Image (spheres, rainbow, N blue to C red):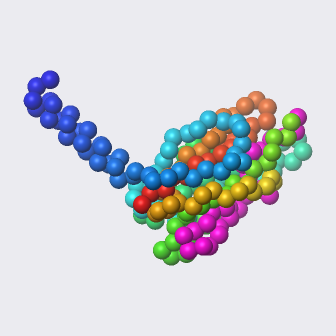
């Protein structure tokens, strides 16, 4: 490698490392009641700032003969504008954005999950609640199936800035879609 090629590679790596440094996180928020199926998707971060709102994508109940999936996705709405999401299931639609009051951000969450149903129709995650930095609690507009588990820890500093979801791909019988989620806190 000649000197000019080395300089280009150095500048390229330096530039990308600087961008990665901008979204360093200081803690990861998890809960212990997430569903057992699926694979973890890619971590996605707000480009700048923190999440000050969210919306959910869910499938309405399909009745006795249909396959219910419940929660299919969670979208973080960033204070700097824009929306980020990790893996999202294919069923249902998104609903109204829930936002923290002005100058307040998402800092903790609780997940509503249905326990495995054996031979019955499994749905796994069905809804989510968030706590804002000012103490306001927000709940998604989704299915009323399952129970909320314990609240996650609160961001130690800063607020939620990133998301990673665990989603089961479509299976021939009894798909569940979103099973679990992790949130990342940034200063």
Q: Quadrant of the N terminus?
A: top left
Is residue 22 magenta-colored?
no
Q: Using the rendered view, name the quadrant where residue 169 is placed.
A: top right
Q: Residue at x 65, y 69 (%)?
A: 137
Residue toward you, 60 or 80:
80
Q: From the viewer's perspective, is 27 left or right of 23?
A: right
Above or below residue 177? Residue 71 is: below
Q: From the viewer's perspective, is 121 left or right of 10?
A: right
Measured as percent of width and height from the top left, residue 6 is found at: 15, 31
Q: Which residues are magenta?
A: 119-144
Q: Residue at x 86, y 36 (%)?
A: 118
Residue toward you, 95 or 128:
128
Q: From the viewer's perspective, is 59 left or right of 187?
A: right
Q: Using the rendered view, name the quadrant where residue 120 is placed.
A: top right
Exactly how many numbered labels are in the figure? 0
Q: Using the rendered view, name the quadrant where residue 36 is placed.
A: top right
Above or below residue 99? Residue 170 is: above
Q: Residue at x 9, y 29 (%)?
A: 3
Q: Quadrant of the C terminus?
A: bottom left
Above or below residue 186? Residue 65 is: above
Residue toward you, 66 or 167:
167
Q: Residue at x 72, y 42 (%)?
A: 35
Measured as percent of width and height from the top left, residue 85 is found at: 54, 50
Measured as percent of width and height from the top left, residue 140 is found at: 68, 61
Is residue 121 magenta-colored?
yes
Question: Is any atom of residue 94 visible in this view?
Answer: no
């Amino acid at each position: 490698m000649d000197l000019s090629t080395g300089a280009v590679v150095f500048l390229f790596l330096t530039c990308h490392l600087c961008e990665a440094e901008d979204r360093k996180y200081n803690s990861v928020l998890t809960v212990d009641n997430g569903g057992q199926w699926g694979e973890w998707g890619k971590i996605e971060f707000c480009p700048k700032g923190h999440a000050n709102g969210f919306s959910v994508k869910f499938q309405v109940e399909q009745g006795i003969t249909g396959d219910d999936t419940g929660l299919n996705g969670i979208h973080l709405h960033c204070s700097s504008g824009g929306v980020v999401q990790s893996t999202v299931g294919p069923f249902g639609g998104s609903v109204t954005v829930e936002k923290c009051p002005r100058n307040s951000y998402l800092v903790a969450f609780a997940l509503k999950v249905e326990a495995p149903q054996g031979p019955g129709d499994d749905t796994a995650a069905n809804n989510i609640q968030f706590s804002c930095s000012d103490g306001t609690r927000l709940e998604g507009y989704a299915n009323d199936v399952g129970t909320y588990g314990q609240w996650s820890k609160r961001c130690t500093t800063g607020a939620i800035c990133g998301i990673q979801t665990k989603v089961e791909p479509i299976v021939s019988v009894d798909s569940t879609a979103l099973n679990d989620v992790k949130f990342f806190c940034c200063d």
